[in-house]
Amino acid sequence: MTKLISLRYATLLATVLLAFGLVTRGHAQNNDNLATLDDAYATLAHADHDYKGHRARAMKQIELVVQALGGSISGKGRGHEPQATSDEQLRAAQGLLGQVTGLKGKAAKHLARASKELGIALSIK
């Protein structure tokens, strides 16, 4: 009887510790994603050219991803770069968005839209 109770407590403790570890890992991934999204937003904010509104729409979608994840955007501002530099910044932001993983629901949809807008923006010359 004592062994059975000890086994149950050990199993319960292991389950709680495992669940805590999974929550902590998920929280860490969410923080990594938020930092990456913030970097992508800041990169786009410094790009100078409008790209017929697609850069701005991608930025809005990134804001919506961050909101869906419970975060906020900190990178804002505008630069004054030539077109080639601006294109590189959009490519860099696109690469950062490609590093964001594990999103579901609205956040995943907004991330896909942001990537699509960047693709369209980069096709504009």
Image (cartoon, rainbow, N blue to C red):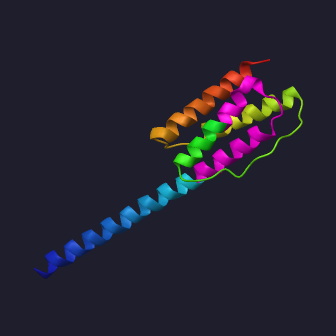
Is residue 42 in the magenta section? yes
Identify the residue at the far bottom of this view: 2
Left or right of 75 on screen, residue 70: left
Is residue 52 in the magenta section? yes
Prevailing SS of the magenta stretch: helix
Q: Quadrant of residue 53?
A: top right
Q: Residue at x 20, y 73 (%)?
A: 7
On screen, residue 35 above or below 101: below
Identify the residue at the far left of this view: 1
**Total marks in image:** 0
Q: Position of residue 114 (x, y in %)?
A: 62, 33
Magenta segment range?
32-59
Q: Residue at x 54, y 57 (%)?
A: 28
- Residue in the foreground of this view, choosing between 34 and 49: 49
Left or right of 16 on screen, residue 107: right
On screen, residue 12 above or below 109: below
Q: Quadrant of the N terminus?
A: bottom left
Q: Quadrant of the C terminus?
A: top right
Q: Position of residue 20 (x, y in %)?
A: 41, 65
On screen, residue 99 above or below 18: above
Q: Position of residue 21 (x, y in %)?
A: 43, 63
Q: Position of residue 74 (x, y in %)?
A: 71, 52
Q: Residue at x 60, y 52 (%)?
A: 32
Q: Residue at x 67, y 48 (%)?
A: 38
Left or right of 37 on screen, residue 22: left
